[in-house]
């Protein structure tokens, strides 16, 4: 049972109904959860919905997001997660600077620590997570996108780690994730200059997986993210999760240790029913039906 705050009780009641597909839970909620149905069943969409502050991270938003992730981590019915914005023209503007202005130094430190942990929790979700950047992703918003496994972006979406313009540094993992995606020298250039660049630039640098021309409804990157998620859905969910774990853990160690991590992850799929189903489906020349077992 969920442990959300009382003011989110209606939201929690809707969220717990995993078998239901819904597009809008209620207005005013800062994170909306949608579980797609039909051929897209297994895709869970998390929609940032704080338009009055360009989806900036407030204390309440971070708290709510953290609660959602605790339960999502245990949800085997979610095979792929898509993170998007429901606010036109912006993905996430980073930290809520208006709120931060009233914080003490201690409170700022505590908030940054909490935000860093939130992004680590996104990064450590067992299923693939795709960020859809249909608008500006700046500062902490871009750090959140970097915490996802894959990224799609509209050509004109603006992004960047802009913290040095405010005499601070990226504090939610950006100084660590960007150099692991790019070369350290290029990551330093982008961080030191606080450069803002487009989705097209991001693809050329290798930051985003796919870039698309924006459409009239402003959700081209989201549609591309869902299309990418649909390619993942037919595959064995345990296999996909173990592949993610093997890659994520392996890139942090030397190659020999990485081989051992891969061996351990492979061992987890050997006794599964899905593995046997895959073999039977191949022999019978049919599509496998995986159940995550």
Image (cartoon, rainbow, N blue to C red):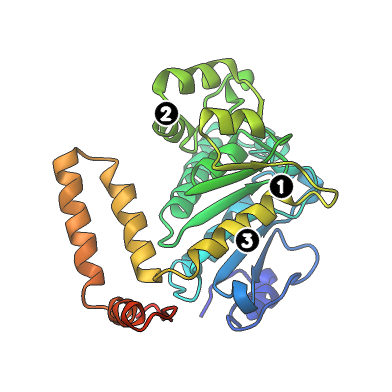
* Picture residue at 31% right of the left edge, 83% below the top: 280
Helix, strand or loop at disc 2?
A: helix
* Picture residue at 48% right of the left edge, 53% below the top: 122
Crowding at mark 1 (Cα within 10 Å: few <14, some 14-19, many 20+)? many
Q: Which residue is mark 1?
A: 55
Helix, strand or loop at disc 1?
A: loop
Earlier-in-chain disc, 3 versus 1 = 3
Q: Which residue is mark 3?
A: 46
Task: Point out which mark residue 233 bears.
Answer: none
Of residues 19 and 5, the one nearer the viewer is: 19
Callout 3–callout 1 Cβ contact below 8 Å: no
Residue 195 location in percent, x, y?
Answer: 62, 20
Crowding at mark 3 (Cα within 10 Å: few <14, some 14-19, many 20+)? many
Residue 89 location in percent, x, y?
Answer: 79, 43
Helix, strand or loop at disc 3?
A: strand
Callout 2–callout 3 Cβ contact below 8 Å: no
Q: Is residue 170 visible?
A: no
Q: Is residue 220 above or below residue 289?
A: above
Q: Is residue 105 above or below residue 216?
A: above
Residue 108 location in percent, x, y?
Answer: 55, 36
Q: Which residue is mark 2?
A: 179
Give the quadrant of the C terminus. bottom left
What distance separates the C-alpha of mark 2 from that of mark 3? 27 Å
Q: Is residue 224 above or below residue 166?
A: below
Looking at the image, residue 37 sits to the left or right of residue 126; the answer is right
Crowding at mark 2 (Cα within 10 Å: few <14, some 14-19, many 20+)? some
What distance separates the C-alpha of mark 3 from that of mark 1? 13 Å
Of residues 135 and 4, the one nearer the viewer is: 135
* Picture residue at 49% right of the left edge, 45% below the top: 147
């Amino acid at each position: 049972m969920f442990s959300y705050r009382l003011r989110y009780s209606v939201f929690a009641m809707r969220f717990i109904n995993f078998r239901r597909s819904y597009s809008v839970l209620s207005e005013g909620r800062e994170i909306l959860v949608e579980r797609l149905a039909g051929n897209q069943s297994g895709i869970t969409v998390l929609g940032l919905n704080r338009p009055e502050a360009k989806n900036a991270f407030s204390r309440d938003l971070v708290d709510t997001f953290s609660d959602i992730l605790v339960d999502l981590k245990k949800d085997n019915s979610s095979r792929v997660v898509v993170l998007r914005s429901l606010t036109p023209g912006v993905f996430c503007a980073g930290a809520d600077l208006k709120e931060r202005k009233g914080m003490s130094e201690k409170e700022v430190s505590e908030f940054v620590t909490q935000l860093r942990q939130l992004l680590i929790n996104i990064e450590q979700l067992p299923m693939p997570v795709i960020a859809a950047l249909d608008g500006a992703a700046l500062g902490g918003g871009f750090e959140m996108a970097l915490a996802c496994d894959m990224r799609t972006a509209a050509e004109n979406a603006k992004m960047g780690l802009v913290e040095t313009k405010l005499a601070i540094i990226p504090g939610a993992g950006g100084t660590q994730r960007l150099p692991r995606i790019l070369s350290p020298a290029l990551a330093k250039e982008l961080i030191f200059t606080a450069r803002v660049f487009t989705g097209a630039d991001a693809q050329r640098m290798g930051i985003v997986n796919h870039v698309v021309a924006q459409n009239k409804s402003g959700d081209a990157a989201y549609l591309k993210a869902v299309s990418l998620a649909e390619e993942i859905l037919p595959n064995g969910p345990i296999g996909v999760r173990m592949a993610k774990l093997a890659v994520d853990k392996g890139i942090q160690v030397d190659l020999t240790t990485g081989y051992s991590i891969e061996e351990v992850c492979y061992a987890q799929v050997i006794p599964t029913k899905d593995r046997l189903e895959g073999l039977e489906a191949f022999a019978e020349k049919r599509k496998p039906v995986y159940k995550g077992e």
